[in-house]
Image (spheres, helix red, strand yellow):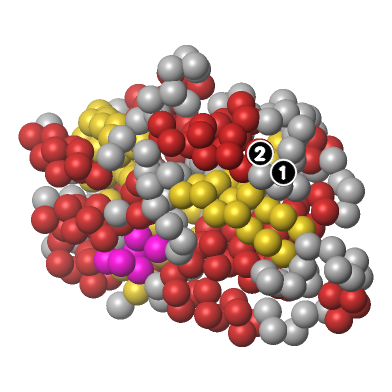
Amino acid sequence: MNDRRRFLCCAVAGVLVDPARVLAQAPGKVHRVGYLNLRAGPTALDEAFLLGMRELGYAVGRNLAIEYRWASNQMERLQGLAEELVRLNVEVIVTATTPAIRAAMRATSTVPIVFQATADPVGTGLVASLGRPGGNVTGLTLQSTELARKRLQLMRETVPGAARVGVLTLRDPDSQLASDRLAGSLMLAETQAAAQQMGVALVARAVVDAGELPDAFAQFQREKAQALIVQVNPLTLQHRPKVVELAARHRLPAMYEVRSFVDDGGLVSYGPDLNEMYRRSAAYVDRIFRGAKPGELAIEQPGKFEMVVNLKTAKTLGLAIPQSLLLRADEVVQ
């Protein structure tokens, strides 16, 4: 099921909105949201956020206005876009990914910031703790760093005997932080620690734009990687058909963090439901509209992780997925 179908299914389920919740909205009040994203434009993820807002009684054009700012995967644009939203006097900035959140935090210490997804908000220094983030920031975490070991274990089960594993991540050019405070670096460090214990050699490559993807996969091939782990980020999400196609061309079994890659032909994914996270971020916006302080709203962690396996892709790769793995999968794509 692709992103669009997943969104439409959610939309049908969301038709039954609590009438009392709708009536509770102040008549005539139009709330203004700033929406900052590193991606080039809207996807089903952003529609899921709008669905969440509608379920809570907010509708664009009636009591909600959204100022969208897209950075087209150009990190250097984020700061200017964030500052522009602050000048527009939005009530809250909604964003995702560490670079965008960081840009919003540099732009304001007073406007509430809600992040829809980020890898490791504590490890990257965005918040003080998950329970009480402090400051003007709150939201939801993917827990990508904590899942790094699990994904490597699953990848080795998927490709038994894999001794060299590639890792594709995003390079953050932000010079204001040490490299060990960047989300991609934290995920890679956790994967490296797990790999050392498992006796696995890693072939790591960090990219900053889509033009680097072919060379990254050529590197994986040159260095004889037998499997690949792909970190979810705005670049890989936007260009996931290209990422999946390159993995297929190089006959490289790949593990992804979210199922949309598998829907597009990727081999296997393990992680939280990203659409659901974007939908649930609306609840944070609603609570802030009602007077809650973001620094006192606990960071939400995923309640469930799903594993999806694409048997058609496995067959194309000539890979026999172990039955023990298939029995644990939440969904098997035939």
Q: Quadrant of residue 318?
A: bottom left
Q: Which residue is mark 1?
A: 89
The reply to whether residue 138 is in sight is no
Residue 260 falls within the magenta-colored stretch: yes
Residue 291 falls within the magenta-colored stretch: no
Q: Is residue 26 above or below residue 240?
A: below
Residue drawn 56% across and 27% down?
124
130, 53: nearer the viewer? 53
Mark seen at residue 86: 2
Q: Which residues are magenta?
A: 259-265
Q: Is residue 232 left or right of residue 81?
A: left
Disc 1 crowd rating (10 Å Cα; few below 14, some 14-19, many 20+) is few
- Callouts 2 and 1 close, C-beta under 8 Å: yes
Q: Position of residue 333 (x, y in %)?
A: 34, 74
Q: Position of residue 142 (x, y in %)?
A: 56, 46
Q: Is residue 41 left or right of residue 277?
A: left
The residue lying furthest to the front in this view is 87
**SS assignment at label 2:** helix
Q: Is residue 63 above or below residue 39?
A: below
User: Number of marks in the image?
Assistant: 2
Q: Quadrant of residue 233?
A: top left
197, 300: nearer the viewer? 300
- Separation of residues labelled 2 and 1 (CA atoms): 5 Å
Q: Quadrant of the N terminus?
A: bottom left
Q: Is residue 106 above or below residue 313?
A: above
